[in-house]
Amino acid sequence: MKKLLLSLSSVIALVLLIESCTKIRTTELGGGLIPAVDNVTVFDTTLEVITSVYGLPDSTRQTRDADHLFGILEDPFFGTTTGEMYVQLHPNLFGTYPFGSSRDSLIGLDSVVLSLRYKSIYGDTNSVQGFKIYEIDQSAPFRDSSTGYLISHPSFAVSNLIGEKSNVSYLTLNDSLQYIRAKDTVKTANELRIVLPNEFGMRLMNFDTTIYKTDSAFNTNFKGLAILPDDASALKKAIAYFNLADQAGTRLSFHYRTTRNGKPDTTVTDFVLRTNYRATANIVRKDPSGTPFENQLANGGENQSEVFIQSTPGSYSLIKIPGLQELNNRLLYKAVLIAEQLEGYDDAMFPTPGLLFLDAVDSANSRFITVPNSWVFLQNNSPLFYDPGTFGGFLNNKRFEFDLTSYVQGIVTRKEKSFALRLYAPFTTRPVVTSIGTNQIPLTISNRLGSGRTVIGGGAHPTQKMRLYLVYSRL
């Protein structure tokens, strides 16, 4: 089974923001239909679970339109997360020289500025980090990719350090800005501007006009930009998210003077990530060295008292419920898996994932499946394709809960199989939805890559055990 768990992983898709839903309470079903436990006709009991923890091998691919993770986050409990961004920016059109009528019309370059559209932050907003801008080496295998690059892809080779911006306070990333663009004053926000050397800009402006005939000719001479975090940054406690496909906010802007109709004219040419062009990569590394999380991964096969769950690329908990398959027939009013959040792990600074996901390990068929009977496929609820307010997975009152009533009823009444369960915080995942067929269905669980982690009580915790709580009547 462990071999199976280490071989399957998730894929990338676009996301929408997940909002909180109503808590699943162990004392209500369908808005108060559950009868009270009286120990005469209605009983309750708790089944113990065995929890182990493993690293989650990941085949997530980050697409051009997704928010890209950048920076260095040092978490004393889970380790270091590092995000690098790579992008190829082009003129809007190829076939003509993009800077005025011709190179001979150029008077001079005033400035060249790389702008990045800021979206959000995870971690300590007081973080102060540096941005280093490199040229992607021409030998690097970086190109337009229809499927997106794996977030686990090795870093692409870089050559020249083009420029950098040091000591960027993450608190200022959403500040309002005002600057001159050609003859206009621009007022905007959520835009990080990095001034690059004019020598770099003039190099691109001096390209022969034949280089601007096609994108392939341009790429042969300039592969793109690598935006890397500075290891020497002052406070590395957060990761920021930028959207590289937002042409209004992410662009390489050339502010220059040219001759137009015989007179000097100030203008701007932007290079952007063109529509339908997918040359972006977001390389994400997580290193748990020297942390409690590393120790748990080394000893995760045992029943754990603490379960460390880290979002993609992160970890999962394998949950076994030994007494479930032998449970005799009964009428179930409620069967809920309860996992309690443990305190003391800097949760205020590093919040929990927005949503945890639970699926089943069908080891006999070498696949993961949605939890039979309890997880309900909703065709019109893309990109989740289910209702987490009903099934569970949100944190409410320091608990994660999952409604497994129909799943357990199938086991005790129809003698259906009891599976090991997998609890994790994926960006996207692809389980088989057995109720509609045998194909994997892509589910988008999180709206941000690498955002969130939590520590919950495991099956061996002395006071806050993970457990399966049942309310039932005898038959």
Image (spheres, rainbow, N blue to C red):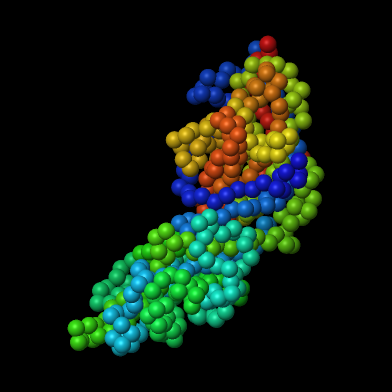
For this rendering, which residue is in front, 52 or 33? Answer: 52
Q: How many marks?
A: 0
Q: Residue at x 67, y 57 (%)?
A: 78
Q: Residue at x 65, y 41 (%)?
A: 423
For this rendering, which residue is in front, 348 or 308? Answer: 308
The image quadrant that residue 209 belongs to is: bottom left
- Residue 239 visible at all: no
Q: Is residue 107 above or below residue 321?
A: below
Quadrant of the image for the N terminus?
A: top right
Q: Is residue 282 above or below residue 405?
A: below
User: In the rendering, at what x and y percent does residue 308 appear?
Assistant: 68, 49
The image quadrant that residue 156 belongs to is: bottom right
Quadrant of the image for the C terminus?
A: top right
Q: Residue at x 75, y 52 (%)?
A: 297
- Residue 187 visible at all: yes
* Left or right of 342 in this view: 106: left
